[in-house]
Image: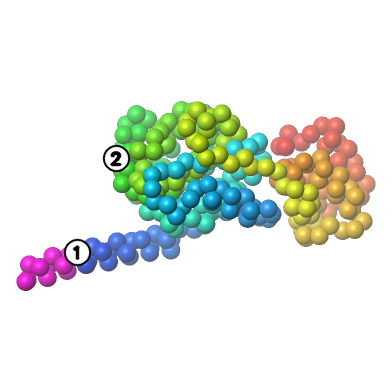
Amino acid sequence: NFICMLYLGRYEHEVIQKIVEEVSRKINRSPLHVANYPIGLESRVQEVNSLLDVGSNQGVSMVGIYGIGGIGKTAIACAVYNLIADQFEGQCFLGDIREKSKHGLVELQETILSEMVGEKSIKLGSTNRGKAVLKSKLQRKKVLLILDDVDRLEQLKALAGDPSWFGHGSRIIVTTTDKHLLRVHGVERRYEAKGLDDKEALELFSWHAFKSNEVSPSYMDISKRAVLYSNGLPLALEIIGSNLNGKTMPEWQAALDTIERNPDEDI
């Protein structure tokens, strides 16, 4: 009886410790910044979330979000992460992969291990070893991994090479401008991020140009001109609206004339 009580006491202690660690992890995790003005995001997030089917613990699902630059793919991925991250044992949002991978993929593999399982001091040495370690550490964990701004197949192979790397119920989200890349890697569930409709675009433009959700009546016609030029692209609406904020009507007209002749390099 004493041995049984000792065993149960140890088991109870381990359960309590795991609960404490889980609660602590959730409390300490800060939500990702999505957007200053998340216009039109809710419906897009719900569409991606339906593709993820988070309620199912069967198998591993990969979902690709694709579309042109500045369309809001990263914002959608961040919002989805904030919505569902607490349902997973491990989480990692790996952003700006296009740029970071220029310095090698090993560091990105190490970042995943650090955030998923707390392996902060591990040095992998090579991407091949990284693939093996990722699989051994994550294949029994239900994880959420977001790979943002992927532009080469080797990045996907090094960071999420195969569903067998991850435990049942895991979800991997990939954002990219290259739909073909998703197809080649076998990502069958794909969501095309599209521009804002006219109403959403005008509201987002207004927040940046007037710091309000309503356009000044005297500026309505010229605001519609700016929105038409932006073609529903959130980045363009942000840049143009911010550049016009606080300027006079003649300055608006001159600025839009210039933009239409020589587009801003950031758009």
Q: Which amino acid type corresponds to the residue marked 2 in the rendered image?
A: Ser
Q: Where is residue 58 shown, x and y percent of the image? A: 38, 48
Residue highlighted by disc 1 = 11
In the picture, the quarter occupied by the C terminus is top right
**At 41% from the left edge and 54% from the top edge, which residue is drawn?**
88
Q: Is residue 98 magenta?
A: no
What is the secondary structure assignment of the residue under circle 1?
helix
Q: Residues within 10 Å of mark 1 (few under 14, many from 20)?
A: few
Q: Which amino acid type corresponds to the residue marked 1 in the rendered image?
A: Tyr
**At 56% from the left edge and 29% from the top edge, which residue is drawn?**
180
In the picture, the quarter occupied by the N terminus is bottom left
Which stretch did the figure color magenta? 1-10
Of the image marks 2 and 1, the number of the one nearer the N terminus = 1
**Disc 2 to disc 1: CB gap under 8 Å:** no
Q: Nearer the viewer, residue 219 or 166?
A: 166
What is the secondary structure assignment of the residue under circle 2?
helix
Is 248 above or below relative to 109? below
Q: How many marks?
A: 2
Q: Where is residue 92 shown, x and y percent of the image? A: 44, 47
Question: In the image, 181: left or right of 5?
Answer: right
Query: How was the colour assigned to the protein in this rendering?
Result: rainbow
Magenta region, main secondary structure: helix
C-alpha span from label 2 to label 1: 25 Å
Q: Which numbered circle lies on residue 101?
A: none
Q: Nearer the viewer, residue 176 or 254?
A: 176
Q: Where is residue 227 shown, x and y percent of the image? A: 81, 46
Question: In the image, 195: left or right of 245?
Answer: left
Q: Where is residue 104 shown, x and y percent of the image? A: 45, 30
**At 50% from the left edge and 28% from the top edge, which residue is drawn?**
184
Residue highlighted by disc 2 = 136
Question: In the image, 51: left or right of 91?
Answer: right
**At 78% from the left edge and 60% from the top edge, which residue is drawn?**
212
